[in-house]
Every structure is written in structure tokens, then in C-alpha cells.
Image (cartoon, rainbow, N blue to C red):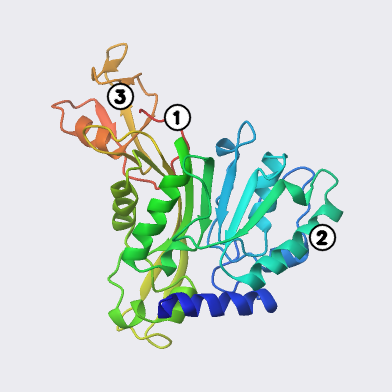
Amino acid sequence: MSNYLETAHSVYKEAAENPQKGLCCTTTPVWQLPGLSIPQKMLEMNYGCGSTVNARDLVNQPTVLYVGIGGGMELLQFSYFSRKHQAVIGVDVVDEMITVCQENLIEAEKQNPWFRKEFIDIRKGSALSLPIEDNSIDVAAQNCLFNIFEEADLQLALKEMYRVLKPRGRLVLSDPTCEQAMPESLKQDARLRALCLSGALPLQQYIEMITAIGFGTVEIRAKRPYRILDPENYDTDTLLYIESVEVCAIKDPMPADGPCVFTGKTAIYYGKDEYFDDEKGHVLLPNQPLAVCDKTANALSTLERNDIFISPSTFFYDGGGCC
């Protein structure tokens, strides 16, 4: 095991034995769902920088994989949508975290009449070698885990997620990103990587690593302020601004002209005709915004027209797109 993974193991062993609210990440608002009661210890162990639980991903009681289980909060939230035997699989490498998670699920069963701990199958294993069959998962997720890995291991972890997903399956991710160059001394600081800080990549590089694995569609669902690394407290000459991003990567076939990446761009047609058809599958109705992927936005912007407006990326894509 590499030094940075050993450090991460140590950090989360301690976090399991002594829960630390907001240990590595800003504590984010938790889904409030009818009839769902989250035990206090689970809330205190909310070691994530965003959310990977989205109702539109969780129709028809999917089989869900969650890697890096923490206190079990997201396992419980996923179970809310998949109430069947071992429908939600949790994988973690830290024995102490597995033990505490199982204890938390027993408490969750007491607080939630609908919940059975048998809905969840917890397995010991690494994100780099998942104990999961090929093409068996509908929705896979990780929260504030992949930034711990250096590039080669991140590629391996992404390949593992791709391997276990069914065709059209979804990988939902939440990780820190940083558009500024991270000093090498911070990138090599194993503890800061474990605390979800210095492993942050620029968003475009993060997306390119995902699509390089083969995911044909990527949705940027949220991008929010996260942390500051300042010269007084960290080994940096400038303020480093870190954001958290929520992403969904879909195991669609890769289009011949490259992946469809949705970053919240919109096309608006304001011409005099009944509609505009680019004859590539995109029909724009007058003054009806249409979410478009970056590839389509670029193609529309090159047309010699003065009646189509392309909005900038909002980094909040909420479905209803062109592709």
C-alpha cells in the first residue's frame, strides 16, 4: 500500500473510532425525505463534500454500489429508494469504519419502521479492486474519495467503476476541484490528500479522466464553493480556491465525435421561424431554452446566424438535454 493510501487508512480509522463532524469536508445539507430518520452519529460522520443521492437516478429499485461507506448515511438514503434484500452494496477498506457503519445501521433500523439492515450488503474491499461482478450495478457512487488517489490509481478506480456498471449505468461522484495549479508540496502531502484538499484537480482534467475511461455522457450537476488554502496555514504562495463538484457519468456508448458533456449551457432561438432544426437532432423552439452539451453548443455557435444565443456554463445541469 502506498504512503498516501496508508495515511488515508489511518485518518479514517481514527474517524471511525472518534467521529469528527466535518472532518474533511464542509458538512452539506442532508436530504430530508418523508419517513427517513438519520441517526445522529451518522450525521456526525457525514464525511463528504456534496451528495451522490439523486431521486432521478434511483427509479425502479436499482442495485446501488457505494464506495467509501463512512458512517452509512448515504447507504441508508440509497436504501430509501431500493427497499429489497442487499440492493445496496457498500465497500470500504477500513475495518473500523465497517464496524461503526454496521452499528449505525442497527440504530437506523430502530428509528425507521420501513428499513431493514438486510437491504444493505457491506463488503470489505478497495476501490482499486472492487469485490463486484462485471456489469451488475445500476448506480455506483463515491463521495470525496477519488481525490485521495494519485493519477494512476484514480484511473484504475474509474476503470473499476466502469467495469461493474451495467450498460447505461450511472456513476455519481462528488469531489473537490481546483482551477489553480496545486503546489507539488501540497499534492504530495498524504494527510492533506486524505482530508480531501490537495488532490483536487481542475474540472476539465477531472472530466477528461472520466471520459477517457469510456463514459459517453457526463453531467455536471452542481459546483459550489468549498475551501481556501491560504499561505499562512499551508505551503502555498497564493490563495487556493477549492470548489466541490457533483457529477454523473453515464455508461453510454461513446459517440463518434466524442463524449457529450453537459455543463449547464443553454441554447435559445429567438428568430421569426416556427422553429430551428440543425438537422442533427436538435430542434429549437422560439424563446424556449434547451439544455445542450458543450459539443452541441460549440457547433451551434459556429453557425452564421444572429438568432441563436448560447449561454455560458452554469455548472448546474438538471436534465432535459439535447442528446
Which of pointers 3 and 2 lies earlier in the amino acid sequence? 2
Q: In the picture shown, does residue 142 fall above or below 14?
A: above
Which of pointers 2 and 1 lies earlier in the amino acid sequence? 2
Which is in the foreground here, disc 2 or disc 1? 2
Front residue of 62/37: it is: 62
Which residue appears at 58% of the width and 63% of the height?
92
Crowding near the residue tagged with mark 3, few <14, some 14–19, many ≥20 C-alpha atoms within 10 Å: many
Q: CA distance from mark 3 to mark 2?
A: 54 Å
Looking at the picture, which amino acid does disc 3 mark?
Tyr
Q: CA distance from mark 1 to mark 3?
A: 16 Å
At numbered mark 1, what does the secondary structure look like: helix, strand or loop? loop
Looking at the picture, which amino acid does disc 2 mark?
Glu
Q: Are marks 1 and 3 in contact (CB under 8 Å)?
A: no
- State whether residue 253 appears in this view: yes
The answer to whether residue 258 is left or right of residue 63 is: left
Which residue appears at 40% of the width and 85% of the height?
234
At numbered mark 2, what does the secondary structure look like: helix, strand or loop? helix
Residue hosting label 1: 320
Front residue of 31/310: it is: 31
Q: Position of residue 235 (x, y in %)?
A: 35, 86
Front residue of 138/183: it is: 138
Residue hosting label 3: 269
Image quadrant holding the N terminus, namely bottom left
Residue hosting label 2: 107
